[in-house]
Amino acid sequence: MQINAIQIVFLVIISGIAGIGSVLDSFQTHRPLIACTLVGLVLNDVKTGVLIGAALEMMALGWMNIGAAQSPDSALAATISTVIVILGKQSVSTGIALAIPIATAGQVLTIFVRTITTAFQHAADREAEKNNIAAIDTLHVSALIFQFLRVAIPTLIVALSVRTSVVQGMLNAIPAWLTGGLQVAGGMIVVVGYAMVINMMKTRKLMPFLFLGFVTAAFTDFNLIGLGILAVCIAVLYLQLSPEYNVNSSNSVVVTSSSSNADDDLDDELD
C-alpha cells in the first residue's frame, strides 16, 4: 500500500494530537482505541485500526502515571504499531507484540522531552511575576509543540520507511519465539491492567456480581449486547430489592406514622 501526501499530513496531525493528549489527558486522544482507529481511518483500514486499538487498550489499562513515575507511552505505541501493521502488511499479533518495546522506547523519549520543557515552566514562572498572561499562554503552547513532535516525527519516519526492503526484511526476520514471547508478555500486562482497575473499583458486597459476570460469559453464548442487557436488569433489580437503597422510603413511613401520632395526641389535649 502506497501512502499519499494527504494521508501523510493527516497522519502527522493525528499522531501529534495523540502526543499532546498523553500530556493533557483532557480528550483521551492518546488512548490506543482512539489513536489506532483514527490512524486506520487515514490509512483506509478502519477495521484493522479498531482491532489493534482494542487489544492495546486492554494492555494500556495498566499503564498510568503515578507521582513522578512515567508509564510506557501508549500514544507512540498505538500510532507506530498501526502503521506497521497496515502499511507493512503485518499481522495484528505482530503489531501488538511490537507495541511493548515501542512503548518502552516512547517512555524514555517522553522523559527526555519533559525534561526539556522544564525550561518553559521556569520561563512561565518569570512571566507570572510580571503578570504577563499572554506570554504564559505562548509558553504553554510552545511546550505542547514538543509533545506534538515527539510522536509525530517517529510515526512519520516509520510510515515513510516501512515499505522499504530493509524494514520489511527486519520485520520478517523477527523469530516466532520472540513474537510469541512478546504476545505472552502483553497478555500478562492485560491481566495487570484489569487487576488495577478492579482494585480501584472493588466493593466487597458487589464482588459476587463480578464473578457472576465471568461465569455467565464463560458458560453461555451471550454476545456483548446480551450481557449488557442482563447486567442492566440485574442492577435494576438489585437497586429495587436492596434495603440500602430503600432507606428513605422506610424513613418516610416512620416519619408519617410518628407525625400522625403527634397529631392524635394534640387532638386529645384540645378535647
Image (cartoon, rainbow, N blue to C red):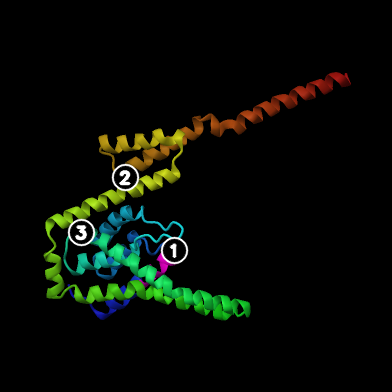
x and y, in percent, of residue 107 in the image = 34, 65
* Chain part drawn in magenta: 16-27
Q: Is residue 67 above or below residue 231?
A: below
Q: Which residue is mark 1?
A: 27
Magenta residues: mostly which secondary structure?
A: helix
Q: Is residue 25 magenta?
A: yes
x and y, in percent, of residue 36 in the image = 30, 63
Left or right, 51 with reference to 170: right
Label 2 amino acid? Leu
Label 3 amino acid? Val
Q: Which residue is mark 3?
A: 92
Disc 2/disc 3 C-alpha distance (Å)? 22 Å
Mark 3 closeness class: few <14, some 14–19, many ≥20 residues within 10 Å: some
Q: Earlier in the sequence, mark 1 or mark 2?
A: 1
Residue 157 or 226: which is nearer the viewer? 157
Q: Are marks 2 and 3 in contact (CB under 8 Å)?
A: no
Secondary-structure class at tag 2: helix
Residue 231 is marked as none
Q: Earlier in the sequence, mark 1 or mark 3?
A: 1
Q: Which residue is mark 2?
A: 224
Disc 1/disc 2 C-alpha distance (Å)? 26 Å
x and y, in percent, of residue 68 in the image = 45, 61
Mark 1 closeness class: few <14, some 14–19, many ≥20 residues within 10 Å: few
Image quadrant containing the N terminus: bottom left
x and y, in percent, of residue 34 in the image = 35, 62
Tell me if I can see residue 228 in this picture.
Answer: yes
Q: Is residue 207 magenta?
A: no
